[in-house]
Image (spheres, rainbow, N blue to C red):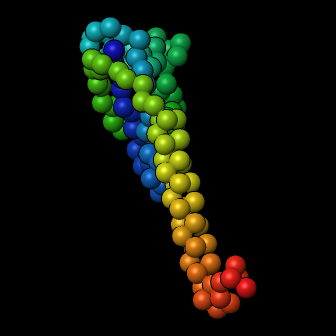
Amino acid sequence: MFIAHVKQPGGCDYTIACGETVWRLKADTREAAIKEMKAEIIGELDGSECRYYEGHWDEHALSNVTLFEVSNEENIPVDEWYAEALKIVKDTIAELEEQADKAEFEQLKERYGDLNNV
């Protein structure tokens, strides 16, 4: 499997990689992947779908393309990661609330005494 990381010039002021994306290519060989990328980027040079017109490339012109051959792929269980992290956060909050409640209870006992012995 081949993927291509493509970048447009400039980008933006954000940290979310504006002007960048990853294409999953259909090609099975390096040569076919390069041909597929060229067809996608340049278009058909017979004029039917060429992306060059009026003296320049269209607004989607790229500044860089990097081709990667992927030998293995793995789906990452991000939903499980989020659920695990959320459970830790909720457990931590519950523990802190319990500690605060106990501390408040001890302060009230000191102030008013043990009401069970009245």
Q: Is residue 32 something that shows in the picture?
A: yes
Name above or below for residue 30 compared with residue 6: above
Question: Could you say where residue 22 lies in the image, as x and y percent from the top left?
Answer: 42, 30
Question: Could you say where residue 114 lies in the image, as x and y percent from the top left?
Answer: 65, 83
Residue at 68% x, 90% y is 112
Kindly indicate the quadrant of the structure image that contains residue 97. Answer: bottom right
Q: Residue furthest right?
A: 118
Residue at 65% x, 88% y is 113
Q: Is 94 on the left-hand or right-hand side of 42?
A: right
Name above or below for residue 42 compared with residue 81: above
Towards the viewer: 118 or 19: 118
Q: Is residue 57 something that shows in the picture?
A: no
Name above or below for residue 81 compared with residue 97: above
Towards the viewer: 75 or 101: 101
Kindly indicate the quadrant of the structure image that contains residue 6. Answer: top left
Q: Is 20 on the left-hand or right-hand side of 69?
A: right
Question: Could you say where residue 98 lies in the image, as x and y percent from the top left?
Answer: 58, 66
